[in-house]
């Protein structure tokens, strides 16, 4: 991961309708300041913010995936800025301490101690 400029993960729905959830590897890439290109699939859009921390493409759209990859090659500054924004997004929305605090608040609201 440390040697790449961007990370690409093309998930797709199987012929039987099966999907993966939210791939942790996308969170790892963003935490490493790498912008991501991935698909509009399951929980991926919670991690990859289209046009902000990377790009989302339709499942199995090879041409659009390649086009977005070229965007990163041609605009190194954008690639870097999206990577930084991805890291910030992970810190703000996926930090374990913050998530635990939110969960405790939910339990308190439900009256669970």
Image: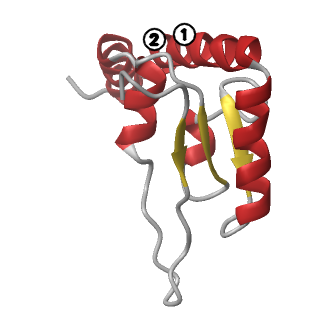
Q: Looking at the image, is 47 positioned above or below residue 79?
A: below
Residue 2 percent location from the top left of the image: 36, 21
- Picture coordinates of residue 27, whole percent (x, y): 42, 31
Q: Nearer the viewer, residue 65 or 103?
A: 65
Q: Give whichever of 47, 76 is nearer the camera.
A: 76
Q: Is residue 7 left or right of residue 103?
A: right
Q: Which mark is residue 97?
A: none
Quadrant position of residue 36: top right
Q: Residue at x 38, y 12 (%)?
A: 98
Q: Quadrant of the C terminus?
A: top left
Quarter of the image where the N terminus is located: top left
Mark 2 nearby-residue class (10 Å; few <14, some 14–19, many ≥20): some
Colouring scheme applied when the structure was drawn: secondary structure
Residue 38 drawn at (x, y percent): 60, 48
Q: Of residues 41 and 93, which is closer to you in this image?
A: 41
- Kindly report the distance in space between the C-alpha atoms of the residues bearing marks 1 and 2: 5 Å
Residue drawn at 41 percent across, 18 percent down: 32
Examine the rendered structure and indicate whether residue 51 appears above or below residue 11.
Answer: above
Q: Residue at x 56, y 17 (%)?
A: 89
The vertical placement of 62 against 14, above or below, is: above
User: Is the C-beta separation of discs 1 and 2 under 8 Å?
Assistant: yes
User: Residue 16 vs residue 85: left or right?
Assistant: left
Q: Which residue is mark 2?
A: 91
The extreme bottom residue here reads 16
Disc 1 is placed on an element classified as: helix
At label 1, counting other C-alpha atoms closer than 10 Å, the crowd grade (few under 14, some 14-19, many 20 or more) is some
Q: Residue furthest front?
A: 74
Residue position for label 1: 88
Q: How many marks?
A: 2
Local secondary structure at mark 2: helix
x, y percentage for residue 13? 55, 74
């Amino acid at each position: 991961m440390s040697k790449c400029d961007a990370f690409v993960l093309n998930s797709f729905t199987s012929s039987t309708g099966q999907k993966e959830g939210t791939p942790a590897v996308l969170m790892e890439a963003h935490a490493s300041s790498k912008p991501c290109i991935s698909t509009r699939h399951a929980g991926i859009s919670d991690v990859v913010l289209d046009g902000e921390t990377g790009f989302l493409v339709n499942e199995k759209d090879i041409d659009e995936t390649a086009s977005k990859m070229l965007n990163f090659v041609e605009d190194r500054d954008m690639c870097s800025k999206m990577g930084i924004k991805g890291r910030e997004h992970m810190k703000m929305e996926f930090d374990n301490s913050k998530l635990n605090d939110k969960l405790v608040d939910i339990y308190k609201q439900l009256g669970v101690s």
